[in-house]
Image (cartoon, rainbow, N blue to C red):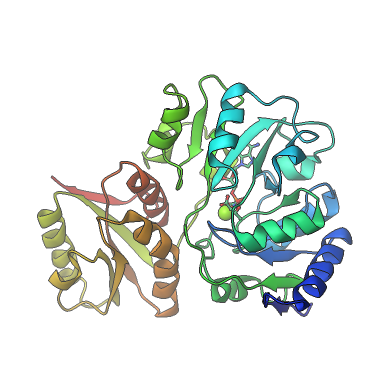
Amino acid sequence: MKTEIIKFKGNEKDKKYLDKIKKTFEKGGLVVFPTETVYGLGGNGLDANACKKIYEAKGRPSDNPLILHIAENSQIDELVLEIPDVAKKCMEKFWPGPLTMIFKRSDIVPDAVTGGLDTVAIREPSHKIANKILKAVHLPIAAPSANISGRPSPTKIEHVLEDLDGRVDIVVDGGKSVVGIESTVLDVTVDPPMILRPGKITLEDLQKISPDITIDQSTIDATNKKVPKSPGQKYKHYAPRAEAICFGGNIDKMVLEIQKNIDENKDKKVAVLASTETIDEYKNCDLKINLGSREHLEEVASNLFDALRHCDDEGVDLILAEGFEPIGLGLSIMNRLLKACSGRIVMRI
Ligand code: TXA
Ligand code: MG
């Protein structure tokens, strides 16, 4: 299949593009589109065949359910059995935006979306292009992150094409994803609601809506072997090809420990993922990537997946990554870093 790349121009041509995207979805085709978190690999969420194609294109196990994306709050009504009060409040405060919620699903949602579960994940993205497309199509669009299963989620069109060129009908170019990590997933079918995947909307943000909201501890404890509550948790994610180790604890000691690891691995191509504050400390490594400032964790989140992919492009053997304090957005960043490192963390307190 030849993949067509579309870039909206902000003029009358856009209407033609939107028509083409709409038709592609309606006939069961696949369209990659930008969202504020990461790029999504979209298909008609009410068409089981389109959903099967999504799993095939990603090489994803079909028991790992998909998120349905909508343009307007009212579209949720036919997809779910009930909207708990706390979800209504979250919709008001955080939609459109990087929050996905899990509801009890209605009969019109195909098993292919939910992996056979009786719940369904729904999100209303805030990205202008995503919203324009979802409004024009007026269908719930199933869209996992637009990467081959197991690779870091794509935050740039180059990442998408690396993984999916020739596997999808259309890729819509929307520049760099601002948030850079996937949406927060909040299960509102349980009481109290529980975060299954941390993201830009933090535990602290959600607790302002309802103080009893909790977080699944396995999202931050890489050694936790309990049965995952979200099927996505059991798969190795965000993984670069290189071996990766994360370092935490006291910053000065962490820097020394990373330098020691650089010095001990002279036979390997070593990359360090560091913060703006510490990057100049490292000597004699092959590649240094500045993730951003510890004072502005939004930068770090936004650059993280691009950094992991860049290490792969450069043929790096070993990635030594600085850790971040697991509070607020730092917790979401650590969740992704630990997955990239298959849970390997060295603490120097
Ligand atoms: O930011 C995002 O959420 C991006 C953009 C494209 O919207 N999408 C995304 O989708 O990250 P995906 O499929 O890569 O991740 C969806 C996560 C998975 O961990 C999946 O297991 C979980 O949501 N999930 C989906 N439906 C669920 C359900 N019914 N119950 C529990 N977890 C669910
Ligand atoms: Mg994904």
- 271 relative to 228 in the view: left or right: left
Image x and y of residue 344, in percent: 32, 51
**Residue drawn where x is 84% and y is 66% of the image:** 24
- 179 relative to 33 in the view: left or right: left
- 173 relative to 159 in the view: left or right: right
Query: Can residue 59 be seen in the rendering of this structure?
Result: no
**Residue drawn where x is 78% and y is 49% of the image:** 45
Quarter of the image with the N terminus is bottom right
Q: Is residue 285 above or below residue 84?
A: below
Query: Can residue 274 be seen in the rendering of this structure?
Result: yes
Image x and y of residue 271, in percent: 29, 72
Q: Is residue 190 above or below residue 102?
A: above
Say which of 29 and 293 sits in front: 293
Image x and y of residue 239, in percent: 46, 60
Quarter of the image with the C terminus is top left
Say which of 240 and 160 sits in front: 160
Residue 18 sits in quarter = bottom right
Furthest toward the front, the residue is 11
**Residue drawn where x is 14% and y is 76% of the image:** 283
Q: Is residue 340 above or below residue 198?
A: below
Residue 170 sits in quarter = bottom right
Say which of 248 and 19 sits in front: 19
Q: Is residue 162 above or below residue 42?
A: below
Say which of 201 and 103 sits in front: 201
